Amino acid sequence: MNSENPNRRHFLKSALAASTAPMILPAGVWAADDAPSKRITMGFIGMGKQNRGLLNGFLGRKNTEVVAVCDVDTTRRGSALRQVNDRYRDRAPSGWKGCEAYNDFREMLERRDIDAVCIATPDHWHAIITIAALDSGKDVYCEKPLTHNIHEAKAVIAAVERNQRVLQTGSMQRSMTGFRTACELVRNGCIGDVVKVSCNFGPPGVPCDLPAESMEPGLDWDFWLGPAPGRAYSPVLSPRGNHDHFPAWRDYREYGGGMVTDWGAHHLDIAQWGLGMDESGPVKALPPANPGKDTKGARLVYANGVEVQHGEGIGVHFFGTEGEVEVTRGRMHFKRGDESIAKFLQREDGGSLEGAVAKAEKGFLQGASIKLYRSQNHLADFLECVESRKKPITHEGIGGRSAICCHLMNIAYYHGEIVEWNPEDNTLANSTGKDAWLTRHYRGPWTVA
């Protein structure tokens, strides 16, 4: 499925060999058969719990072929390789030549036979690997948050544009019917004018102060750290072996942004969707009442005066002049005035989420003027867009701007100051804040230009 790409760029100060770009195939061609030339060949980078699940999902798609896995941990790397080989043992795609395992993602990206990569490393690696993959001519599925900081969000958006690649951010709530219906209710004025939005998720990140521990062999710890500051090993950050939980590296500012960039990346993304701000964003970030102490209470303010508050609720709660919509995974509630129109928040409510969604759609969205992007499956949507070359449901602009919302909120927590923002070009406004807050120190040789 590959053809020469003469525009491949150098990246990370290392020249790589010329790569290839996915061929644009006629719609429906993969439905005809699974000939090797008609499948998307994929590589996977960062083989922890999340990417093992994604790998399983992509392995289940007939129009994909997994040819490479990469991780800095020997055990996780070997486990991912076995996962692919076991899946293909009795039903390998015709022409499949096997799967290779890599410690260094750059070696994987040199391969001409890989069309797309799936990235699920810790956040501090997202932008570096994503940009390298884009510059090597590959399409990218990258987990949320798309980047570790605002500077990187702008760099990733620019890299997609200059390489004309397809990027999907793993903000999969947009491919869930409940969230789309909730946002359509809001966008079509079913709750009147939006007054505020409350998003509930955990605290911002904190500096890493974990004690050093002895490390078992098999983990390339220096490579795991990559652009982050050097420090001694801690299994809290990178548990040894093939762990079945989400490690706590995400709690620490050096590697993630706490729950503000973890669950916040999901819920603030839905707030952006419901407010119709996918091509824009807030104009101000306000710290909590007690900066340095409070872990909730920061706010994002939009040009129309609507505030998105980090506070209480079940997930995302839109408040309007005529009603409310609250939504999270598996639950939704739509009210007009004091009347509950469609509700499924717990089993005691009776019915189901699907029933509540159908009731809301039948009563208020038939013939609605605003219909949002409909994706039934986040992975399938990415693959369909790799074929069609259209923008997927959470493309780089959406993933980048949702990440910026998270980072602005964290800046308000970290520095305790009001920050004004220009969402048109994603820059600080009115002499507030500091440019240094938008990026980080990169440990050599890694950088994001």
Image (cartoon, rainbow, N blue to C red):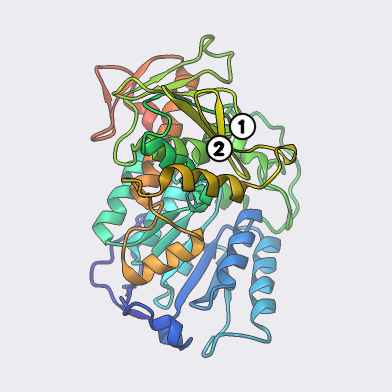
Residue 242, quarter of the rendered image: bottom right
Give SS at disc 2: strand
Judging by the rendered image, the residue that carries numbered circle 2 is 327
Q: Position of residue 298 (x, y in %)?
A: 49, 20
Distance from the alpha carbon under mark 2 to that under mark 1:
7 Å
Q: Residue at x 66, y 47 (%)?
A: 352
Q: Residue at x 66, y 42 (%)?
A: 237
Foreground of the two, 371 or 298 = 371
Foreground of the two, 60 or 207 = 60
Q: Is residue 107 above or below residue 65?
A: above
**Mark nearer the N terminus (2 vs 1):** 1
- Left or right, residue 175 beside residue 277: right
Foreground of the two, 449 or 268 = 268
Amino acid under disc 1: Ile
Residue 72, quarter of the rendered image: bottom right
* Callout 2 touching callout 1 (CB < 8 Å): yes
Q: Residue at x 26, y 17 (%)?
A: 431
- Left or right, residue 215 beside residue 191: right
Residue farthest top in this picture: 290
Q: Residue at x 52, y 51 (%)?
A: 177
Count of labels in the image: 2
Q: Residues within 10 Å of mark 2 (few under 14, many from 20)?
A: many
Q: Position of residue 90 (x, y in %)?
A: 68, 87
Image quarter hosting the C terminus: top left
Give SS at disc 1: loop
Amino acid under disc 2: Val
Q: Which mark is residue 314?
A: 1
